[in-house]
């Protein structure tokens, strides 16, 4: 369980930090603070040192806020339904380390020893800035196709013509025995129907949705538990419940899935496919 949580958290963090628009927002915020020189930095620091000060400060505080938000998203997923609310809870929790780091950077820059009142003021400011910056991050990530915080899951609601088979969602007592489902958003945790490779990701189709997860295909197969199904190709696994029939064409065979999608069958698996669904 701990390993799955760690991998899920790293996956979500990877999705957040790879968004170009997030970095554009970060750069814009640093530029604004550099040019305006708030909190007396315009008077106390020259242009280049002021840029360095705000760049280091924002890099440290944004990192704390984003990591805290991602951790909160994973820890509270079963208790709080809204991804935005989970993220803001994490941002609020980050205000204390942000305040301490801000005081430390200020003390190192201006050669001063902060008082308790100074630290508390920095924590209060950190709360406001953390919530503000995480709200900006949320808006930025919502413009990306791979929104990891979205409760519906990556591309889970997108309709690209691949419909799901009319299979009833598996009871919770069954799905909880499938480790792979712990990697999915709660809204997508139905009975696995189809797994396929998509670049460095595995696309998981269930009875209730579809989601991309950052996991090797072979590792995903190992987390299917006892779900009845078969690997039919180096890039495809199909559940028994999702198979409509076998399509034959000039000596080649394919699996027809619910919704009309056809999955190729490689020669390696052709014999066992015919025996199983033949």
Image (cartoon, rainbow, N blue to C red):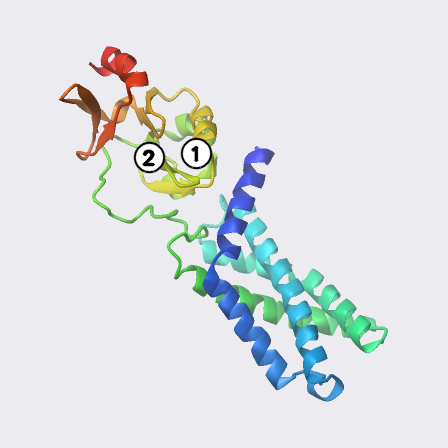
Q: How many marks?
A: 2
Q: Which residue is mark 1?
A: 181
Residue 58 lies left or right of residue 229; in this view the side is right
Residue at the image point whose x is 50% and y is 55% from the top: 18
Q: Position of residue 212 (x, y in %)?
A: 39, 42
Seen from the viewer's position, the closer of residues 47 and 176 is 47
* As drawn, 74 above or below 255: below
Q: Position of residue 113 (x, y in %)?
A: 86, 73
**Do we see residue 138 in this rendering?**
no
State the image quarter where residue 206 is shown. Answer: top left
State the image quarter where residue 102 is shown. Answer: bottom right
**Do we see residue 15 in this rendering?**
yes
Label 2 sits on a secondary structure element that is strand
Mark 1 or 2 closer to N-term?
1
* As drawn, 174 above or below 209: above
Graded by Cα atoms within 10 Å as few (under 14), some (14 to 19) or many (20 or more), the crowding at tag 2 reads many
* As drawn, 201 above or below 22: above
Residue 255 lies left or right of residue 150; in this view the side is left
Graded by Cα atoms within 10 Å as few (under 14), some (14 to 19) or many (20 or more), the crowding at tag 1 reads many
Label 1 sits on a secondary structure element that is helix
Residue at the image point whose x is 42% and y is 40% from the top: 201
Quadrant where the C terminus sits is top left
Please report contact status of discs 1 and 2: CB closer than 8 Å, yes or no: yes
Label annotation for residue 134: none
Residue at the extreme front: 250
Seen from the viewer's position, the closer of residues 221 and 5 is 221
Label annotation for residue 206: 2
Q: Position of residue 239 (x, y in %)?
A: 31, 24
Quadrant where the N terminus sits is top right
Q: Position of residue 249 (x, y in %)?
A: 14, 23
Q: CA distance from mark 1 to mark 2?
A: 9 Å
Residue 271 lies left or right of residue 216; in this view the side is left
């Amino acid at each position: 369980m701990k390993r799955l949580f760690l991998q899920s958290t790293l996956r979500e963090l990877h999705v957040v930090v790879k968004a170009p628009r997030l970095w554009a927002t970060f750069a814009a915020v640093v530029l604004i603070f550099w040019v305006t020189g708030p909190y007396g930095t315009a008077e106390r620091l020259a242009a280049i040192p002021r840029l360095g000060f705000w760049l280091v400060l924002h890099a440290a505080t944004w990192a704390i806020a984003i990591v805290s938000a991602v951790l909160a998203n994973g820890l509270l997923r079963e208790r709080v339904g809204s991804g935005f609310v989970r993220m803001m809870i994490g941002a609020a929790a980050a205000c204390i380390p942000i305040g301490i780091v801000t005081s430390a950077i200020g003390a190192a820059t201006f050669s001063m020893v902060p008082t308790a009142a100074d630290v508390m003021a920095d924590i209060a400011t950190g709360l406001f800035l953390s919530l503000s910056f995480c709200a900006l991050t949320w808006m930025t990530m919502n413009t990306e196709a791979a929104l990891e915080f979205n409760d519906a899951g990556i591309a889970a609601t997108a309709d690209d013509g691949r419909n799901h088979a009319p299979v009833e969602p598996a009871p919770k007592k069954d799905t909880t025995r499938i480790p792979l489902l712990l990697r999915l958003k709660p809204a997508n945790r139905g009975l696995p129907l189809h797994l396929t490779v998509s670049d460095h990701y595995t696309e998981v189709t269930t009875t209730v949705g579809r989601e991309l997860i950052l996991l090797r295909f072979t590792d995903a197969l190992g987390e299917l538990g006892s779900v009845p199904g078969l690997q039919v190709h180096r890039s495809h696994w199909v559940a028994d419940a999702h198979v409509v029939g076998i399509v034959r064409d000039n000596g080649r065979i394919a699996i027809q899935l619910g919704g009309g999608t056809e999955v190729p069958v490689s020669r390696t698996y052709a014999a066992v496919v015919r025996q199983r669904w033949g």
